Image (tube, rainbow, N blue to C red):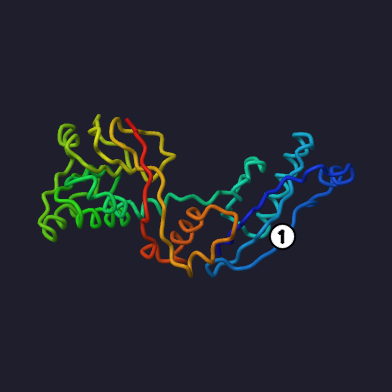
């Protein structure tokens, strides 16, 4: 079973020489553990004091000890507090927002539809469950769809034509892509394309290195989350990665999370 880890790091200001000695030599000193459930799953909460006056070697030893203790407790995903940069790089996998942002990709397109216009272009590697959901959401708000995918796009395109009577273009040409008012980028296009200057573009996986020239990038999402879900989020931690991890593991219904607003930034 997945055990969530929540690590709160704080700077131990002006520690005495005895404190520095213990932090440098005594394993686990200055680190406190507690536990409770989050979304019905066991969670380990850690209060880890950082002493910046230790040597880099001692700092690394303390980080390795924290990693060992978390691993022994079964933690395989961690959330780090908002001021957790002082922890350095823990080897444990961090909770990320990729699943939730991908799940909400079609909702983002629907949210900006009035501003974006009539045509949406989607770039996928394959059409799986999340991609299909995005297309179905976009079909409710756009009069034309363009779909570029390496595989598995034919069936959903035929279904969209039958269900909504939509003109759906498979593997659009660069000139067709230039007509898009909204672009969903989950995979690099199979050819060189450029978005129009007015096209709103959403790339759910912000760490992916590719980019498409032109357009206006939808960056941050502001969400409306039901109170019974919000109250499960520990204070002092970024909300979206925790929501994403809970949704990915089936602990919450991401369909209850709505787009409140989006931030945009010139990408071209």
As drawn, 239 above or below 13: below
Residue ranking furthest to the right = 18
In the picture, measured across the screen, residue 118 lies left or right of residue 230, that is: left
Picture coordinates of residue 167, whole percent (x, y) = 11, 49
In the picture, measured across the screen, residue 144 lies left or right of residue 253, that is: left
Q: Residue at x 55, y 64 (%)?
A: 1
Task: Determine the secondary structure under disc 1.
Answer: strand
Foreground residue among 119 and 211: 119
Picture coordinates of residue 60, whole percent (x, y) = 72, 39
Question: Residue 36 appears in which quarter of the rendering?
Answer: bottom right
In the picture, measured across the screen, residue 181 lies left or right of residue 4, that is: left
Q: Residue at x 48, y 57 (%)?
A: 245
The quadrant of the rendering that contains the C terminus is: top left
- Local packing at callout 1 (Cα closer than 10 Å; few below 14, some 14-19, many 20+) is some
Q: Residue at x 14, y 44 (%)?
A: 169
> What residue would you read off at disc 1?
33
Picture coordinates of residue 265, whole percent (x, y) = 37, 37
Question: Residue 90 appears in which quarter of the rendering?
Answer: top right
């Amino acid at each position: 079973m997945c055990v969530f880890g929540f690590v709160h790091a704080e700077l131990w200001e002006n520690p005495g020489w005895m404190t520095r000695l213990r932090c440098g030599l005594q394993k686990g000193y200055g680190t406190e553990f507690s536990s409770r459930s989050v979304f019905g799953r066991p969670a380990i909460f850690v209060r880890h004091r950082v002493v910046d006056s230790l040597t880099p070697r001692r700092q690394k030893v303390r980080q390795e000890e924290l990693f060992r203790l978390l691993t022994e407790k079964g933690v395989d995903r961690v959330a780090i507090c908002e001021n957790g940069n002082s922890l350095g790089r823990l080897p444990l996998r961090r909770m990320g927002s990729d699943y939730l942002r991908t799940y909400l990709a079609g909702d983002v397109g629907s949210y900006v539809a009035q501003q974006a216009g009539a045509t949406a272009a989607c770039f996928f590697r394959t059409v799986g469950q999340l991609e299909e959901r995005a297309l179905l959401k976009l079909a409710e708000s756009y009069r034309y769809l363009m779909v570029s995918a390496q595989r598995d796009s034919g069936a959903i395109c035929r279904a969209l034509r039958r269900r909504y009577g939509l003109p759906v273009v498979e593997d659009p040409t660069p000139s067709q892509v230039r007509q898009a008012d909204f672009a969903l980028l989950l995979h690099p296009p199979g050819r060189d394309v450029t978005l129009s200057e007015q096209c709103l573009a959403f790339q759910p996986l912000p760490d992916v290195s590719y980019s498409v020239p032109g357009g206006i990038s939808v960056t941050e999402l502001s969400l409306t989350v039901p109170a019974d879900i919000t109250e499960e989020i520990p204070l002092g931690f970024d909300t979206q990665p925790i929501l994403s991890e809970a949704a990915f593991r089936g602990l919450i219904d991401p369909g209850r999370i709505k787009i409140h607003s989006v931030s945009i930034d010139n990408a071209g």
